[in-house]
Every structure is written in structure tokens, then in C-alpha cells.
Image: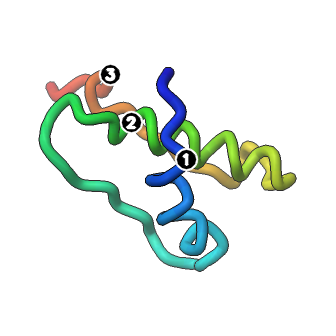
Amino acid sequence: MIHRPGYLGRIQTYLDKPIVKVITGMRRVGKSTLLAQARDELLARGVPEGQILSINKDLVDSR
């Protein structure tokens, strides 16, 4: 996993806000990695794991 402190720094101010966070961009540019790093940041701050929702749409059965 490549650590992206610049991008993570840009979204850190929004991590404590009660809004849905959506990261958009082209395929294979690191959106999922950035969100995983944001999740790790929240866990390091003491946010309970049960309060973080993460859905991998590649693994959801579409039938």
C-alpha cells in the first residue's frame, strides 16, 4: 500500500464531520487505498470499528 499523506491530509478535515464522504475518480488511481488509510486514521483516533461502514462493491453479489 502506498501511503498518500497529501491526499489524506486534504480529507482529514472532513473525517470528523457528520456527512457522507465520497471519493470519486478514474479507475485504479488509489481511491480504495485512500479510504483504507482514512479508516486506519479513524481507528487510530479511537473511533469504534462498528461505527465505520465500508462496502466493497466488487464483492457484493449483484443477482
Question: Label 1 to label 3, Cα distance in Å?
Answer: 28 Å
The residue closer to the viewer here, 19 or 14, is 14
- Mark 2 or 3: in front is 2
Q: Is residue 17 left or right of residue 31?
A: right
> Which residue is at a point 74% across and 43% down the rendered structure image?
49
Residue assigned mark 1: 5
Type of amino acid under label 3: Leu
Question: Label 2 to label 3, Cα distance in Å?
Answer: 13 Å
Sequence-wise first label, 2 or 3: 2
> Which residue is at a point 50% across and 64% down the rendered structure image?
11
- Mark 1 or 2: in front is 1
Q: Kindly indicate the quadrant of the structure image that contains residue 37.
A: top right
Sequence-wise first label, 1 or 2: 1
Find residue 16 and report its horizontal and vertical position in percent: 66, 73
Tags 1 and 2 touching, CB below 8 Å: no
Q: Residues within 10 Å of mark 2 (few under 14, many from 20)?
A: some
Residue assigned mark 2: 32
Question: Label 1 to label 2, Cα distance in Å?
Answer: 15 Å
The residue closer to the viewer here, 33 or 57, is 33
Q: Residues within 10 Å of mark 1 (few under 14, many from 20)?
A: few
Q: Is residue 16 left or right of residue 29?
A: right
Find residue 34 and report its horizontal and vertical position in percent: 45, 42
Type of amino acid under label 1: Pro
> Which residue is at a point 44% across and 53% down the rendered structure image?
7
Q: Which mark is residue 59?
A: 3
Q: Secondary structure at mark 1?
A: helix
- Mark 1 or 3: in front is 1
The residue closer to the viewer here, 43 or 60, is 43
Q: Is residue 28 left or right of residue 4?
A: left
> Which residue is at a point 17% across and 28% down the rendered structure image?
62
